[in-house]
Amino acid sequence: MARGWESKNVGEQQSAREASPGNAAKTDRISELEKQRRLQGLQMQRERVLSERTSNPHRRSALELALADIERELEQLGWTVHI
């Protein structure tokens, strides 16, 4: 089946982009920036959870579970506790 000129052009652009020598470095840089943003967001969430005070046992339990989940995600990204 013949492809139209538009799909050929898109295919050529994609193959040219994949073949460019700086593509791997650019992709690595972007993924590193995304990782840093994710780490920063999780750290902010962690600080917010730690700053909340409550006497309600159910709310405290929910906060502890949320904190454990956040810290697990942080550890997967290579974060360690800074004291």
Image (spheres, grey):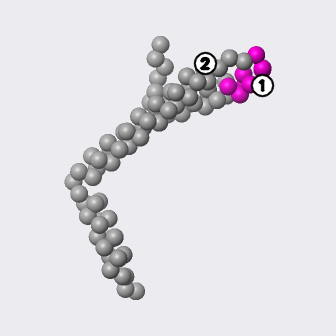
Residue corresponding to mark 1 = 58
Crowd tier of the residue under label 1, counting other residues whose Cα lies within 10 Å: few below 14, some 14–19, many 20 or above: few
User: Identity of the amino acid at label 2?
Assistant: Ser
Q: Which residues are magenta?
A: 55-63
Crowd tier of the residue under label 2, counting other residues whose Cα lies within 10 Å: few below 14, some 14–19, many 20 or above: few
Q: Is 67 left, or right, of 22 in this rendering?
A: right
The part of the image, by quadrant, that contains residue 69 is top right
* Total marks in image: 2
Q: Which numbered circle lies on residue 33?
A: none
Predominant SS of the magenta segment: helix
User: Identity of the amino acid at label 1?
Assistant: His
Q: Secondary structure at mark 2?
A: helix
Q: Is residue 33 above or below residue 55?
A: below
Q: Can you say which quadrant of the picture contains the N terminus?
A: bottom left
Task: From the top left corner, tell me how far across and down residue 58 is, in percent.
Answer: 77, 25
- Between 48 and 39, the one lying in front of the other is 48
In the rendered image, the residue lying farthest to the left is 21
Task: From the top left corner, tell me how far across and down residue 24 is, in percent.
Answer: 28, 50
Residue corresponding to mark 2 = 51
The part of the image, by quadrant, that contains residue 20 is bottom left
- Between 43 and 25, the one lying in front of the other is 43
Q: Secondary structure at mark 1?
A: helix
